[in-house]
Amino acid sequence: MNKNSDKKDCKSKCGYYERCRSETANNFLRSSGLKQLPRVFDIEQFTEYYQTTYIVCPYYTSRLLINDKQIILCLYNYFIDSCVRNSMQISTNNLIIIIDRSHYIKDCVPESNEI
């Protein structure tokens, strides 16, 4: 089996994914998609909210909304590894990055070859 064709088949069959990718949904989610969530929320609240309220894919919704946020908590490899950073479309311009438990960063840097 071809992994790329399997991935494509999954995406084309997933109603959550399809609804999230439409231009109308994108515009709506950007304009009002977060208004009913608390100002601070965790991934479980985010997932439940989007799956039940909007019936869209929480993963792709989070990727869509990431650039509109002021504070994002995530694993540090999202910033250190350029492949992950580029796939998530995270710009490092005008960011303040705070790394918690930075003593673990030495395990991540050799894998990504950069900071």
Image (spheres, helix red, strand yellow):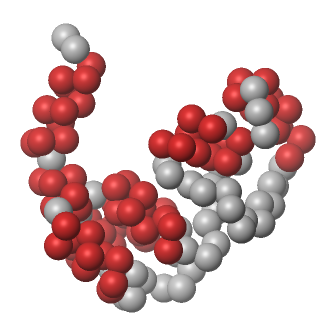
Q: Position of residue 80 (x, y in %)?
A: 71, 42
Q: Classify 36 as above or below 84.
A: below
Q: Is residue 99 left or right of residue 45?
A: right
Q: Quadrant of residue 57?
A: bottom left
Q: Position of residue 111 (x, y in %)?
A: 71, 24
Name the foreground residue: 110 vs 74.
110
Q: Quadrant of the C terminus?
A: top right
Q: Is residue 9 left or right of residue 4?
A: left
Q: Is residue 46 left or right of residue 21?
A: right
Q: Give the residue drawn at x 71%, y 68%.
A: 94
Q: Position of residue 95 (x, y in %)?
A: 72, 65
Q: Position of residue 20 (x, y in %)?
A: 23, 61
Q: Quadrant of residue 48?
A: bottom left
Q: Is residue 55 left or right of residue 38?
A: left
Q: Classify 89 as above or below 106.
A: below
Q: Is residue 52 visible?
A: no
Q: Quadrant of the N terminus?
A: top left
Q: Give the residue drawn at x 68%, y 62%.
A: 93
Q: Give the residue drawn at x 63%, y 38%.
A: 82
Name the foreground residue: 48 vs 87.
87
Name the foreground residue: 101 vs 18.
18
